Image (cartoon, rainbow, N blue to C red):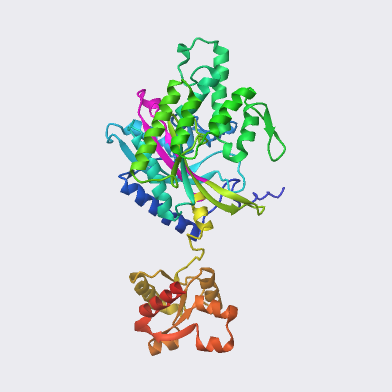
């Protein structure tokens, strides 16, 4: 009889584009989100937690990465006997689910509805260095407010969030534009508004469809302006270009003169907002939608100026487009302006950490009625990386105080110690591994980055004392101290058992001061 083959063991590896987060990473993120939530709350926004899974129909197809499977989302079909189960997908952002939530519960929610949400999102995109398929977002949105005062408020709140978490003024800029202005420029290129209703346009239908497709391609191409520059965008708008890998990317197919108008629009930012707005009015010409967009930007600039937000915080910038397809009006992006070194040691600007805009048609998909909305999304992992880069987050990972176990039969005594420490607000744990080898217990404490180890053997118990080992000081002494210095500054000492909490607190305070 043939020997039955054993099933192969599964490989313990994360899928491509995903990663695991440990201790300090999770703690740092939670602290940063707490600060951002505080700003959102101060502006009157309420928290919302919605499902991570939505129907594909509810999510819609708005991602720029349309060449990916399932239009860039992780989707699957529920199995039913008739084969007609719903298609479900992991959310790709927190905005599309908000539209569904508001449409579903609009009769119970206040109008305007101001909410913030934080959590992971998933995109079926090609992974790369620093680019993951699962990442955290932190959003704030106002639904039901048509006034651009809501957009101005979002921009102000974004600036406040960045400063609250530790990004200094001068290290960031919030850039604002308007999709209506871009559409006005496209009117001058194509001769009609790409967002107009097809039945109202006296044009050849085949040519019209081709133009509408180009409109979306132009948006995705312009969104690459920061990465490839004016010349790169010009090539992508016309015949195409080679990327860094040498692969050729097909162009949109505009003529050189058409592409030139788009480039002129992208690069017409002036010395100040007044000059930029003047140049935008010239760029949109007689387009009604374009003029409306410029007027909205003018109002946003006025409102922000009245609140004291200066050009070192928020500016009008025509090069901001945003890649998502659901934006209909003002769009904004927060960019960190300080330099970092890339993986090859070259200097580059850190780049964008947040973005958003107005999406007045997203809820309409569900209700049939226009519902104005605007909001912003902060890329949590990128902002966290920026704070580490600027030294706003300490790299030190401080673990708990470890109470070692010298006698298994006295576990109750050791648990009493950690109980006292915890009630005093000190993070502490009892070593729960095999206590036979005391050296392994100290190795464990070292691996946990523990600041202090508590030792109480039979002798210490009889004399009513404990040994405290300052692990941080001990490590420093081991690195550089002479024998004489080591004798003068012992890292382990004896204290009365009754003084355990006070002495541990004293050691921790000394470590923080050092």
Give the quadrant of residue 113. top left
The answer to whether 91 is drawn above or below residue 28 in the figure is: above
Left-right relation of 70 to 55: right
Where is residue 186 drawn, in percent x and y?
A: 52, 23
> Is 93 situated above or below 410?
above
Q: Residue at x 44, y 56 (%)?
A: 166
Q: Is residue 43 magenta?
A: no
Front one among 300 and 276: 276
Asked if one can make out residue 82 in the rendered structure from this viewpoint, the answer is no
In this rendering, would 438 be left or right of 107?
A: right
Q: Is residue 377 magenta?
A: yes
Near-viewer residue (397 or 188): 188
Find residue 226 and report its horizontal and vertical position in percent: 57, 40
Q: Residue at x 46, y 85 (%)?
A: 493
The residue lying at 35 percent from left, 37 percent from top is 150
- Taking the spot 61% from the left edge, 38% from the top edge, the residue there is 229
Asked if residue 396 can be seen in this view, the reply is: yes
Q: In this view, does 442 lie above or below 290?
A: below
86 and 279: which is toward the camera: 279
Where residue 462 sits: x, y (%)?
40, 89
Magenta-drawn segment? 352-381
């Amino acid at each position: 009889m043939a020997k039955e083959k054993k099933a192969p063991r599964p490989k313990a590896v994360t899928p491509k584009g995903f990663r695991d987060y440990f201790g300090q990473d999770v703690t740092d993120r939670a602290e940063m989100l707490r600060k951002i939530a505080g700003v959102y709350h101060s502006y009157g926004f309420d928290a919302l937690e919605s499902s991570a899974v939505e129907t594909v129909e509810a999510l819609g197809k708005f991602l720029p990465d349309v060449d990916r499977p399932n239009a860039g989302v992780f989707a699957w079909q529920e199995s039913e006997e008739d084969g007609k189960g719903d298609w479900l997908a992991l959310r790709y952002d927190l905005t599309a689910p908000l539209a569904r939530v508001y449409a579903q519960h609009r009769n119970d929610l206040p109008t305007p509805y101001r909410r913030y949400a934080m959590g992971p999102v998933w995109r079926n995109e090609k992974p790369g260095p620093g680019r993951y398929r699962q990442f955290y977002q932190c959003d704030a949105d106002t639904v039901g407010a048509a006034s651009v005062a809501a957009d101005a408020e979002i921009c102000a709140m974004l600036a406040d969030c960045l400063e609250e978490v530790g990004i200094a003024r001068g290290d960031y800029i919030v850039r604002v534009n308007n999709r209506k202005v871009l559409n006005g420029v496209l009117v001058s290129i194509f001769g009609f508004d790409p967002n107009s209703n097809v039945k109202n346009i006296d044009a050849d239908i085949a040519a019209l469809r081709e133009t509408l497709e180009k409109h979306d391609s132009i948006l995705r191409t312009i969104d690459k302006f920061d990465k490839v520059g004016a010349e790169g965008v010009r090539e992508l708008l016309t015949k195409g270009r080679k990327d860094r890998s040498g692969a050729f990317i097909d162009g949109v197919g505009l003529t050189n003169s058409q592409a030139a108008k788009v480039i002129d629009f992208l690069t017409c930012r002036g010395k100040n907002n007044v000059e930029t707005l003047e140049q935008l009015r010239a760029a949109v010409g007689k387009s009604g939608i374009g003029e409306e967009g410029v007027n909205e930007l003018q109002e946003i600039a006025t409102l922000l100026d009245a609140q004291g937000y200066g050009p070192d915080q928020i500016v009008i910038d025509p090069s901001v487009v945003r890649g998502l397809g659901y934006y209909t009006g003002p769009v904004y992006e927060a960019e960190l302006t300080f330099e970092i070194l890339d993986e090859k040691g070259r200097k580059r600007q850190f780049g964008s950490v947040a973005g958003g805009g107005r999406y007045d048609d997203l809820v309409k998909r569900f209700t049939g009625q226009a519902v104005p909305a605007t909001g912003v999304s902060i890329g949590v992992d990128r902002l966290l990386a920026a704070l580490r880069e600027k030294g706003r987050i300490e790299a030190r990972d401080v673990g708990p105080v470890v109470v070692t176990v010298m006698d298994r039969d006295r576990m109750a005594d050791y648990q009493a110690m950690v109980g006292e420490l915890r009630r005093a607000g000190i993070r502490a744990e009892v070593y729960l591994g095999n206590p036979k080898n005391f050296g392994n217990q100290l190795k464990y404490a070292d691996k946990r980055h523990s600041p202090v180890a508590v030792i109480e053997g039979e002798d210490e118990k009889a004399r009513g004392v404990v040994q405290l080992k300052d692990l941080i000081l001990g490590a420093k002494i081991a690195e550089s101290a002479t024998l004489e210095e080591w004798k003068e500054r012992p890292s382990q000492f004896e204290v009365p058992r009754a003084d355990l909490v006070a002495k541990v607190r004293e050691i921790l305070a000394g470590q923080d001061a050092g």
